[in-house]
Image (cartoon, rainbow, N blue to C red):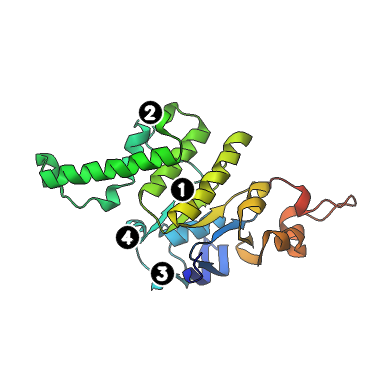
Amino acid sequence: MGTSVLLNIEGLSIAFGGVVALSNVDLDVSSGALISIIGPNGAGKTTLFNCICGLYHADSGMIRFSGASLAGLKPDAIARRGIARTFQNIELFLRMTVLENLLLGRHLHFRAGFAAASLGAPHWRREEIRHREVAEQILDFLDLQAVRDRRVGDLSLGRQRMVELGRALATEPALLLLDEPSSGMTAEEKEDLVFRIRDIRDEMNATIILVEHDLKLVMGISDWIAVLDHGVKIAQGSPEQIQMHPDVIKAYLGEPTEGGADARTRGTAT
């Protein structure tokens, strides 16, 4: 596993109408890491993702990816640099098939122009075949071949989340941001998701940042965890350190009860 810093965030702050969403957040993510960001609703987790992806532009601070600043770049330019994400609210084309949605994720890699495509030029056909091969490999990887030709809108929520994950993978990201990927999944689907995420890191060499409310999943999969509360990073450490961190227990999980309930005994956050 690599040790170089892939993503470097320094002093990131952003406010909306006087409400501070992120305040002086620092974060270094090494290449090959699988890390999680947790915190209560409104802590700033999705806002952080939106800043990384270029949907929001921070009021102050710096985001560097592979050593280069992302300041001022639009989302498509950031995606071309190798950052992909899934969304808390699924962003798929529900009337299109699973395969068609994955092929949309390949558009960043198309080199042939519209004229070549409309004329069916040989180099465009070769390119289309190559992109379809990549999409088929992802379908196999995520066990989606059985539904490849079904409309996404006809699938269960858990399957739709796997399709969205597949579309993100189709962009061939170096950094994959997963925003609540297990939301709406059954226990069995969550177990499968954990294996898929680990395989993405290990077999596709992707660095992964996970925002997730299921703390059992987070504690079982993360190399380390950062905790946000009201836009401030209040803790960072291994799953074991986070479970016992007093600020996390107090600000995020609540005070321990007399019976000893703390982060170790709670499976999900609200």
Residue at image mark 2: 151
Q: Is residue 226 left or right of residue 253?
A: left
CA–CA distance between discs 3 and 2? 37 Å
Q: Is residue 236 left or right of residue 65?
A: right
Q: Which residue is rendered at x = 60% and y = 62% of the image?
A: 231
Q: Is residue 77 left or right of residue 142?
A: left
Front-lying residue, 206 or 88: 206
**N-term-proximal mark, 4 vs 3:** 3
Name the amino acid type tagged 2.
Arg
Question: Where on the picture, by quarter, is residue 96?
Answer: top left
The numbered dot on residue 66 is 3
The numbered dot on residue 99 is none
Where residue 187 appears, as percent x and y from the top left, is 63, 36
CA–CA distance between discs 2 and 1? 19 Å
Where residue 49 appears, as percent x and y from the top left, is 49, 57
**N-term-proximal mark, 4 vs 1:** 4
Residue at image mark 4: 77
Secondary element at image label 4: helix
Residue at image mark 1: 86
